[in-house]
Amino acid sequence: MASRSAKFLSGIIVCAATVRVHDKNLAEMPYIATSEEYRGQRMVHNLVNHIETVLRRLQVEKLVIPAVEELAGMWIKNFGFSHVGDEQSKQELTRCNTVTFCTSVVRLQKNLARIPDLNLGHSVQAPIEIP
């Protein structure tokens, strides 16, 4: 199952992501972007929180993302991801036919099953919209 998610501000898409749910074990978010003028305003943070909430409600255990090496530290520090290091996880990514990128991209993962959902009050039925 693949889906797209977007964050709106006054009816304008300011941040968007693609999410592919492979099974209860694994989802991937191969693409996420924010309009340049809205960067640094926590748009990605809010959208990722929303996506994680939806994935937890679907009982997906792990979210995997590709990250350029220069930004891997940001994903680890600000979003709680870690490097995909063990051979079993790498084999699972191959088995699920996840999106692959060039060698300057690293794979990061986040275990959703162990992290509490901080967004229980948010609706997962509609896109996030800021008045």
Image (cartoon, helix red, strand yellow):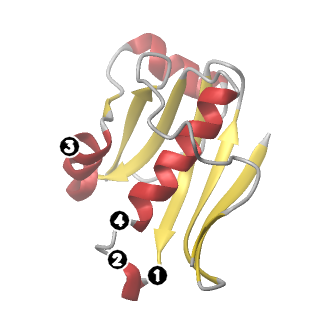
- The span from disc 4 to disc 1 (Cα, nearest Å) is 12 Å
Residue flagged by tag 3: what amino acid is it? Lys
Give the number of the disc on residue 35.
Answer: 1
Image height check: is 95 above or below 83? Answer: above
Please provide percent x and percent y for residue 29.
55, 47
Label 4, label 3: how many angstroms apart (C-alpha)?
Answer: 14 Å
Of residues 79 and 119, the one drawn nearer to the viewer in this rendering: 119
Tag 3's secondary structure?
Answer: helix
Of label 3 and label 1, which has the lower sequence position? 1
Q: Secondary structure at mark 4?
A: loop
Q: Which residue is mark 4?
A: 42
The quarter of the rendered structure image containing the C terminus is bottom right
* Placement of the N terminus among the 4 image quadrants: top right
Near mark 2 (Cα within 10 A), the count class, few <14, some 14-19 or many ≥20, is few
Residue 88 is left or right of residue 103, and the answer is right
What amino acid is at disc 4?
Arg
Q: Residue at (48%, 25%) from the top-left corner?
A: 112
- Percent position of residue 9, x then y: 56, 80
Residue 77 is marked as 3
Q: Residue furthest top?
A: 88
User: Closer to the camera: disc 4 or disc 1?
Assistant: 4
Q: Residue at x 36, y 27 (%)?
A: 84
* Residue ID for mark 2: 39
Marks 2 and 4 in Cβ contact (< 8 Å): no
Q: CA distance from mark 2 to mark 4?
A: 7 Å
Q: Is residue 1 above or below residue 56?
A: below
Looking at the image, do the residues carrying marks 4 and 3 touch, with CB atoms under 8 Å apart?
A: no
**Decide: marks 4, 1 in contact (CB < 8 A)?**
no
The reply to whether discs 2 and 1 touch (Cβ–Cβ < 8 Å) is yes
Mark 1 burial class by Cα count in 10 Å: few <14, some 14-19, many 20+: few
Q: Is residue 109 above or below residue 14?
A: above
